[in-house]
Amino acid sequence: MRDGDRIAVTATGAVLGQCTPHQVTVLGPDGGTLAGNLEPTSEQAVAVAEAHGERLCRAYALWALGLDAWIRGDNAAAEQSTRAGLEIQRGFNDPIGSAMLVGLLAWIAGSYGDHRMAARLEGAARSLWRVLGTSIGAFGPHISRFQARFEQETVAALGPTAFEKAIAEGGQYDSPACAVELALVASADAQWSASVGSCSLTRRELEVAALVAEGMSNRQIASSLDLSPRTVDRHIEHILAKLGFRSRARVAAWWVANHHPPGTLP
């Protein structure tokens, strides 16, 4: 847990099917009834968005899921959720959501020790926030503290001159589309974490995982693959156990990060 702090993010808009940036609320440890582990709420938001075919809300919920994983020090899960959110953003011109996800990926890159890329991603995020006339700090003091620590650690690692150079390089990616592409290419090329391998999954389990990523329910998967719902339930249980995940949202994020052709997320 970074700095002994714990924050809660509730993707309220995604849960209600009405997602706007201002409906993503950040709370401090004593800031409300949802203070604590944000993972269940974020996963619920992802599930509801998937059930309604709502992609933009799903992207915001994946940001919250990725943020929670990063706070807990699970960089691999954070990267997977953030990449899944960025893939969705490819289909929109959403500067706020893009800035949030690119900025989060910058924090993740810093945690992996890739400080130059972290600064470049930060430069891209800053460009988007600048156009909007705000910053990630608008989401609350705890987010501001994470951002300040990230900047301090990155400057210390690179030195002020190299930091500003990398910020300027990233700042050239000053549209949502360009910033998102920078982030996706950077994370794909860097291979910061060893991806959870698919070799442990059977062919059928891979097919089921792909349909989970498309937002299908177990009953829909059963119909699509001509299986019984009980068989699909067992496949889901095996997939979660083999990959070490606790939720379908994690499976979907893993699939997008490791298997989906770029730009083809349903």
Image: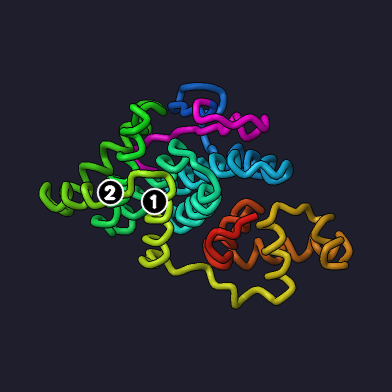
Q: Give me the residue at 62% from left, 76% from top.
A: 200
- 261 and 14: which is toward the camera: 261
Q: Is residue 176 left or right of residue 123?
A: right
Q: Is residue 259 left or right of residue 29?
A: right
Question: How far separated are the C-alphas under marks 1 and 2?
Answer: 9 Å
- 18 and 202: which is toward the camera: 18
Q: Give me the residue at 84% from left, 55% from top.
A: 219
Pointer 1 with pointer 2, Cβ within 8 A = yes
Q: Is residue 135 magenta?
A: no
Image location (x, y in percent) of residue 137: 34, 29
Query: Which secondary structure, mark 2?
Result: loop
Q: Which mark is residue 172?
A: 2
Q: Is residue 222 left or right of residue 134?
A: right
Q: Is residue 84 above or below residue 128?
A: below
Image location (x, y in percent) of residue 225: 82, 67
The residue type indicated by label 2 comes to Gln
Residue that carries the numbered disc 1 in the rendered image:
178
Q: Write down the region rendered in magenta.
A: 1-22
Image location (x, y in percent) of residue 40: 61, 41
Image location (x, y in percent) of residue 27: 46, 26
Where's the C terminus, which quadrant?
Answer: bottom right
Q: Which mark is residue 147?
A: none
Q: Is residue 65 left or right of residue 266?
A: left
The residue type indicated by label 1 comes to Cys
Query: Which secondary structure, mark 1?
Result: helix
Q: Is residue 236 above or below residue 100?
A: below
Q: Is residue 31 above or below residue 70?
A: above
Residue 127 in which image quadrant: top left
- 221 and 52: which is toward the camera: 52
Characterize the local packing of mark 2: few (<14), some (14-19) or many (20 or more) Cα atoms within 10 angstroms. Answer: some
Q: Is residue 9 magenta?
A: yes
State which tag comes first along the sequence, 1 or 2.
2
